[in-house]
Amino acid sequence: MNSNIQKILDFTNSPEIQLEYKELMQQMSLTESDKTKARSYFEDTLVNIYKMALEYKLNINEIEDPEVADHFEQEFNNQLCFFWLELQSEWVRLNNLINFKLNVKQEEDLLMQAESSICSLFLNPLANYIDTETVEASLASLEQLLERAKFSNPE
Amino acid sequence: MTTAIANSFVPDKVLNNIDRINPENADKMPFGVTQVDKEGNIKLYNSYNRDEFADFKGKDVTGKNYFTDVAPCANNFMFSGRFKRGIENGNLNSIFDYLFTYKLAPTKVKVHLYSDANTGTHWIFVKKI
């Protein structure tokens, strides 16, 4: 019970992710102000993952029916998949914007570069906790969500 | 003979003898050498790429797609878009600055996308700057 949820909680508390962040920052030349913003960006991302896992863990532990508990555990896995997708989309957006600015305006936005790399720090470790079945279920949900754009479009 | 673009980091002798590039001599080149097909599927990926751009150390990426599997940060209008337009127009020879941000500290690179008309081969050369 709660195995994947506990793994995610352990991941957010692990020294490894902190170390990876530290090593990343050591390779970047940010102003003090940007370092603070990058730190907040990193911590906010970590806290969001932690809070989501903790919320599910605490509530699932109170459910007596094991079948219902399993259902919510699967729902957590789906939410994790969407969280990963959110991070992936954020990284794509930042990466493309960084390179757009570099190509078109010859501008280097160091804070945005740091945020982009911070996003990518989380992608591989989180993907390890997402199984194929969950990815396929989420793909179907994602398709349904995108379909909504058609209905929302006044044309 | 190829007339190289003036600011390319790829020596003329490499561009003019592109049919002679093989995995062994590509590994000795001081910049990333990737040969792809027109869809971006990798046919050759040298050691500079593996050493400098993380995540694929010691792994064979032959057959994987450069833009979607290996360098997803290059999958946009500015990079893969240039590649596709160059292939479509039959004149791929483009040099530009780019920033890799995927799973590594932001790394600024110079990129040279190049097609060789004689051999019908397509190349992605990358060098850290």
Image: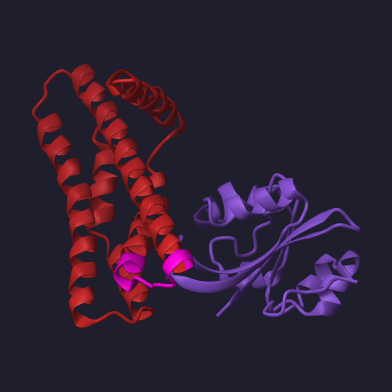
Chain colours: A red, B purple
Between A68 and B105, the residue placed more toward the observer is B105
In the foreground, B47 or A16: B47
Q: Is residue A105 magenta?
A: yes
In magenta stretch: residue B13: no
Residue A123 position, x and y percent, is 39, 51
The extreme left residue here reads A62
Residue at (33%, 82%) from the top-left corner? A29
Q: What percent of the width, then of the height, locates residue A42?
A: 24, 62
Q: Which region of the structure is painted magenta?
A: A103-114
Residue shown at 32%/25% (left/top)? A149
**Rendered position, A119 above or below B2:** above
* Placement of A131 over or under A99, stated as above or below: above
Q: Nearer the viewer, residue B18 or B105?
A: B18
A121 left or right of B112 in image = left
Q: Which image quadrant for residue B32?
A: bottom right
Judged by its main secondary structure, the magenta piece is helix
Look at 31% across and 33% down and name the residue there.
A77
- Horizontal side of residue B66 vs B38, given as left or right: left
Quarter in which the N terminus of chain A is drawn: top left
Question: Which quadrant of the rendered structure holds the C terminus of chain A?
Answer: top left
* Quadrant in the rendering for residue A2: top left
**Which of these two is toward me, A39 or B73?**
B73
Residue A4 placement (x, y as % from top left): 30, 39
- Extreme front residue here? A155
How many labels, in total? 0
Q: Position of residue B31 (x, y in %)?
A: 68, 75
Q: Is residue B103 visible?
A: no
